[in-house]
Image (cartoon, rainbow, N blue to C red):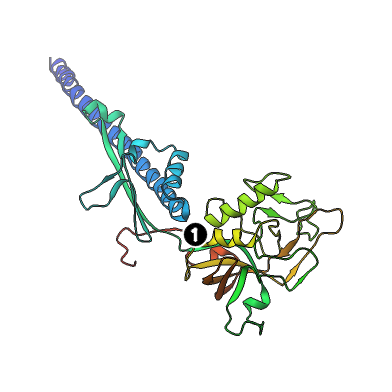
Amino acid sequence: MTTNKQGGWRIGERGQSLPIAAAILMGLLVLAGLVLDGALYYADWQGKQVDLDAACAAAGDGGGYTAFTQSLQANDVPAEFYDPFRVGDDGWPIAGMAYSGRTIYSGLTGPHTFYLAQLFGIHYMDVAVRTRCRVKYVGSSPIAVQEPWYQGDDPSFPDDVFPILGDGAAAVDYTGNDFAGAVIPQVWCVDSSGTPDTNCSDPQFFDPLTDSPSANQLKSVVTNTIAGLAAMPIAPIGMHLPQISGVSNSFLVGAMDDRYDVGDRIVVMVYPGTLYKPDPGYGNWDNVEIIYYALAEITDFDSNTMWVRFVGGPYNSPIDIDGVRSRVIPWDWSAQ
């Protein structure tokens, strides 16, 4: 009898433990679901932050709201996160972007859908991210300057202000056409092995140019580079770039004047002073060799000439120059 009673008690204990085990299992499932959904929410938040940083920087590099939305679309951010434009209680964007001087404030806000948590009545929660970036204030220009001017070695300009674009921007030595100061950054003069080549025997083209571009296409790409609408490849030191020819000085200077004001700073390329003309049979890609980059401040425009003084350099790359690229900064950064 004792054994039977003890066995009965054990059966009863097992019966009581089943609901407890089920409750514990259910609790663990709930906890696992919340942890999983929480991890997915955090990953979504982090991804949106990265996407917003990239979009803000694209806008700050000169592309404005168009570049902002294109960057977000390229990263598959739903439009409802930034359109329509919305601001938070502090007056700054929580969806979209807005300028304040040389700073862009931007935000993304939209729903994140939960999965397992829906079993417990939690369907979605907003993902909200913000970022702030500085607009670039130094423009990269398709202008090449002879080294003696950068070094201040030309006694013809005792005040160290030089006509680097348009009338007066001639090379020191040249066997080809007169040099107006502008080059085509989207064409690199190389040979078939990719080595810089004064003959420009096998030129390498960069978007939007393709093989055998027309004169109008070359004119357009230089204009768009000045305006900040065309990407400017960074030529490595030692690369040869062809001059833009068949374009009037007034056109080139006018394009710069449309974007820049006196006092603005631009990045220029420096060449030794020689404009090379390819040997007969290699075409008309008169070119210069880039030996470093420099920073110049615009001092004056007239109808056919842009004048500058040099304020920085030499640099191995424009990326080394503060202000050339937009950059993300802390939201509460106090500098202007």
Give the residue displayed 62% in from the left and 70% down from the top. 164
Query: Residue 79: percent from the left, percent from the top?
Result: 37, 36
Furthest toward the right, the residue is 280
Give the residue displayed 64% in from the left and 56% down from the top. 185
As drawn, is 73 to the left or to the right of 20? right
Give the residue displayed 30% in from the left and 38% down from the top. 110
- Which quadrant of the figure contains the C terminus? bottom left
Q: Quadrant of residue 163?
A: bottom right
Query: Residue 317: percent from the left, percent from the top?
Result: 59, 64
Give the amino acid type for the residue marked by disc 1 in the picture: Arg
Q: Which residue is mark 1?
A: 259
Give the residue displayed 74% in from the left and 61% down from the top. 287
The answer, for residue 321, to whether it is visible in the render is no
- Tell me: residue 333, above or below residue 13: below
As drawn, is 268 to the left or to the right of 25? right
Q: How many marks?
A: 1
- Helix, strand, or loop for circle 1? helix
Q: Quadrant of residue 96?
A: top left
Q: Quadrant of residue 8?
A: top left
Q: Residues within 10 Å of mark 1 (few under 14, many from 20)?
A: few
In this orientation, which residue lies closer to the viewer: 41 or 70?
70
- Which quadrant of the figure contains the N terminus? top left
Query: Residue 135: percent from the left, percent from the top?
Result: 42, 59
The answer, for residue 95, to whether it is visible in the render is yes
